[in-house]
Image (spheres, rainbow, N blue to C red):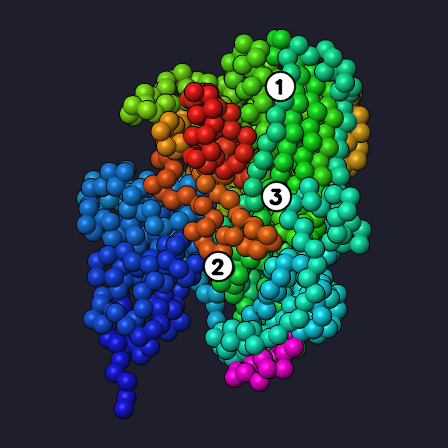
Amino acid sequence: MKKEGIKLFVNETAVEATDPDMSLMIFLREELGLISVRNGCAAGQCGACTVIVDGKAREACAINLGGLAGAKVQTVESLAAGDKLHPLQKAFMKLSAFQCGFCTGGMIMAAKALLDKNPSPTTEDVRQGLKRNICRCTGYKKVVDAVLLAAAVIRGETEIDLNENRGMMGDNAIRTDAIAKVTGRKVFTDDYKLDRPLQAKFKFPDVPHGKVLSVDISKAEKMPGVVKIARHADIPGRKIFGQGMVPQQPVIAGDIVRYIGDPVAVVYAESEAQACAAVDKIIVEYKELPLITSPEQALAEDAHPIFPEGNLLSHNHTRKGDVERGFELSEVIVEGEFETPFIDHGYLEPDAALAEYDEQGRIVVYGSVQNPMGLVRDICACLDLPEDKVIVVTRHCGGAFGGREEPSVHIQAALGTLLTGRPVRMVFSREELNRFSTKRHPMKLHYKIGAAKDGRLLAMKIKITGDTGAYMSSGEYVLFRSCVYSAGPYEVPNAWVDTYAVYTNNVPAASMRGFGSPQPCAAVETMMDALAEKCGLSPIEIRRINGLAPGKQTLTGHVIDYACGFQAALDAIETALKRDGTPKPSARGKKVGVGIACAMKNVGLGSGMEDAAWAQMKLAEDGGFTLYAGGVEMGQGHDTVVVQIAAQALGLPMNRLRIAPVNSEYSLDGGISTASRLTFVSGNACKMAALAFKESLLRFASRESGIPACLLILDESGIKTKEADGGWSVTFENLAKAAYEKNDIPYEKYYYIAPATAPMKECSDNPSGAKEEYRLHFSYCYSAQAVVAEVDENTGEVTVLKVYAASDTGKAVNPALVEGQIEGGVVMGIGYALSEEFKMINGMIGSPSFKDLGILNSSQVPYEIESIIIEDDHQDGPYGAKGMGELPMNATAPAILNAIYDAVGVRVKKLPIRPSELIEMMDSLR
């Protein structure tokens, strides 16, 4: 008997489903190809798959088809009619109310459901209406503003002009990826489909530390649909990967597993369900080894060595002046112990990779990566292939924040294609991602700071220990950054700093936004407030006295000579606070406090490393200009920013340009997307490539016209002579036609190398003099923030009411994108202070689901985030730009800590701030 189908309407089209147990999300994505319905958690916790069902916003992953007979379902694909966008889509584009875009389809549909019922919402209505939709990137403020703007358009009160500027330096240009992201087009890895791919799944270990005695795949191999099961010995080349000093982490574990995320086998099967079933049939026998779960345990004399070399990965230090003499001269001394937790990156798009052979016999890997050329090298080394046999094509990252700097599923997907000859799809579930992926380092920090009675810093002695987990990754570099930024944006003549990266059997810790600077920032900024109180100074006064400025010297000996907006940022915060004053508590039993904190962060790799990028520009057949930049768009706005920079160099609107995706077949290396380096380094490469391309165009036009190139200029439609009235001219379209007919196509490339910096060691040992060679980085960005927070003395709940965030970015290429980075960083910093923690429990994952990460929603963070852009231009930056994507989160958490002290007199020194612990601390003072 034929099973009766389930009939429903999707985007006003009648469709029929057959499996009542299938989720609506899977049906829409896999059966109907409506890929705007993104799979971020498959548990109704992130909102990325939100659609409208019978007029209500619903998470499609949490609804089975069996209950949808006759239902009317609407997805974001239905909102645009031809070239006419819905007001919500236009508003999101206009205000740059998205970054990575993974949440955008669901966010827009939740907003539409709200506006359908309430066409005149308040700010609070919108915040509450979107609270089930998580955005890790934006900080929600621009999202709320976009919904309010769209509501005004729908009511006929205003219009939206998407073409009001030319998209050059300083313009709030529409993002290059805007149309694709607000209409739900293919941009992310799993949006694309391969032809009958095998589905790959890891077999994870049952113990976090053990010797692998045997891996029995005999039963699993016989399971339906299984094509291949790969083990350690099946890897033909190098069997380890990682971006540390040496590769260290196993692609597939061999004789030892060192944490609960080490795969011991990989199953390749015809379906995902079949792969999962086979994974369950793999039998692994272990001999459990001693479990190391903390740096203290790891460094004990009798500790079991996780690696033969021991459990200490690295010890970094900075020595400056005579620290003991500095303390002898100090009239005021403060001291404290601090602790910060593991934090998950929390990006919404789970790691994914697709792999296949192309017609030329090369393995092509598609994925979200921050270092595509590095991934090519890793895959080739592990698969024992020459580099011309592997191509990496980047897809848009659904968030990254440092978490995609090294491979996750990419090598194993490519391995499956090598071993089977078949295309392979490998996508983590949220639980798998949380289990495998790297985290922010938890740290324990001891600070001792001495100063003169007038507030001048005289000495700092600091010890920081970081849990780097089971593998090296970037742990040594992260703890080096903690070392060199341990004094914050302040001049201190005498310092003794030691930082330690220590192996444990916890999940590996590696790169995350701030890269080792948020943890010491929380400590040093709390201590600066304590110092100010003892000196009888205000929090702003003590920071102004000691803050970096031209002529002052960093902890590592670099005398700042230009592009230092720290004092201007501090001034801006002080002005804003004086303007607004401090609000009164909202009720009895609540107290309001104001906290100040500041931060600095490097722009670029520094540390003596060559920091460089290629860029290329070519005349396309249709007369447009194609820009090839090796830097990866992660949502931070790289592609938009470099197009604006190139447009400025050409003197033409940015709509004349298009930027190509990064593809190792034709893209030249732009370096890793890290260290807030891309605006400066990739931006300069694109600027210089565009300037060279402009000359190339003029030379070709000169050959065509016989007119000297020096008499020709570019305008918006083509090239013409400089005479104001008439003369020769040609459109870019006709110029391209001639160029392609003659195979004489204007094309230029440029390799930009950033200013030289000093190696790590030279900046670590006694940099007491004012010497150029102590330039650890070619540029820094600076911030000052003030937080107004309310503390409930009865419950311990802390509510952030408002944040003032001033950031020195150099020249702001696109102010709206800068504001988005500030707002997103501030909200990430609020989460760092109040809610976020990735828990490890005896080596096992204590935070398996998305909701366990503590990421805040739109109703839990303040709408009032005032972004203040400080433009202290850098002489070497592209048109004065620097960079700042990582910086804005650093100062927020310590500003909250200082606001709590201002409100209730309690200094919290452990993150995140638990209400129960805060109550205990307040009770101890009563």
Q: Position of residue 856 (x, y in %)?
A: 41, 43
Q: Give the range drawn in magenta.
A: 216-230
* Residue drawn at point x = 34 percent, y = 62 percent: 62
Of the two numbered discs 2 and 3 on the same chain, state the one appearing first in sequence. Answer: 2
Callout 3 amino acid: His
Splitting the image into 4 quarters, where does residue 214 fall? bottom right
* Separation of marks 2 and 3 at Cα, in angstroms: 20 Å
Q: Nearer the viewer, residue 845 or 554?
A: 845
Q: How many other residues sit within 10 Å of disc 1, few (<14), some (14-19) or many (≥20)?
A: some
Q: Mark 3 points at which residue?
A: 441
Q: Mark 2 points at which residue?
A: 430
Q: How many other residues sit within 10 Å of disc 3, few (<14), some (14-19) or many (≥20)?
A: many
Q: Does the magenta stretch include residue 608?
A: no
Q: What element carries label 2?
A: helix
Q: Mark 1 points at which residue?
A: 334
Q: Position of residue 910 (x, y in %)?
A: 54, 34
Q: Position of residue 139 (x, y in %)?
A: 42, 41
Question: Can you say which quadrant of the picture contains the C terminus?
Answer: top left
Q: Position of residue 378 (x, y in %)?
A: 69, 61
Q: Does the magenta stretch include residue 222?
A: yes
